[in-house]
Image: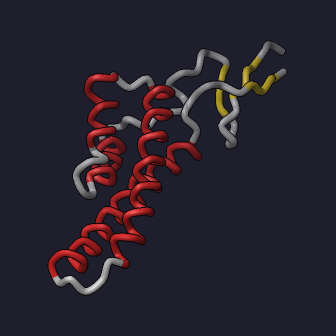
Amino acid sequence: MTHTLAKHTVTPTLLRAFSWVAIIEACTWIGLLAGMYLKYVTQTTELGVRIFGSLHGAAFIAYVVLTVLVARRQRWPIVWTTLLALAASIPPCMTAVFDLVARRRGMFAHAETSRTAPGERFDPHGQLVVETGP
């Protein structure tokens, strides 16, 4: 017999969202820098700053929120990993770099299986399935 329970853990969907937002945040940084170049160096238009400033602000907030969610659910050490992930949102394009390095170091590799007890597994939708006897 099996029971499906929701478990407070990182799902593949949450990890995909974290990665996409990290990339989007980096891209909006590039757009904002290009807009600032056009506004302050060439003095041709403010449009890039208006557009990418708003987009970057939204991407930044989304990245911070997702970082806190993933950090809590993955139980990242606050001092090193979580603060480093948050600090990555300040320099241009470092959120994408952090995501890449975190994946290569296996910080997301066992997000679903690392916190299961014997007889537990996750279904494809991220729901915990508990095996209970015959």
Residue 44 picture location, percent across and down: 25, 86
Number of marks in the rendered image:
0
The colour scheme of the drawn protein is secondary structure
Query: Relative to residue 112, is residue 48 depicted above or below?
Result: below
Decide which of 3, 91 is in the foreground and name it. 91
Kindly identify the residue that appears in the image at 44 percent across and 47 percent down: 61
Residue 118 picture location, percent across and down: 61, 15
Extreme-bottom residue of the structure: 44
Query: Relative to residue 61, is residue 37 depicted above or below?
Result: below
Query: Relative to residue 93, is residue 105 depicted above or below?
Result: above
Q: Quarter of the image containing the N terminus?
A: top right
Kindly identify the residue that appears in the image at 34 percent across and 31 percent down: 82
Q: Quarter of the image containing the C terminus?
A: top right
Residue 106 picture location, percent across and down: 36, 37
Kindly identify the residue that appears in the image at 65 percent across and 25 percent down: 7
Decide if residue 110 is on the left or right side of residue 100. right
Q: Which quarter of the figure has residue 30?
A: bottom left
Residue 91 picture location, percent across and down: 22, 51
Q: Which quarter of the figure has residue 21?
A: bottom left
Kindly identify the residue that appears in the image at 74 percent across and 25 percent down: 5
Q: Which quarter of the figure has residue 68?
A: top left
Decide if residue 116 is on the left or right side of residue 42. right
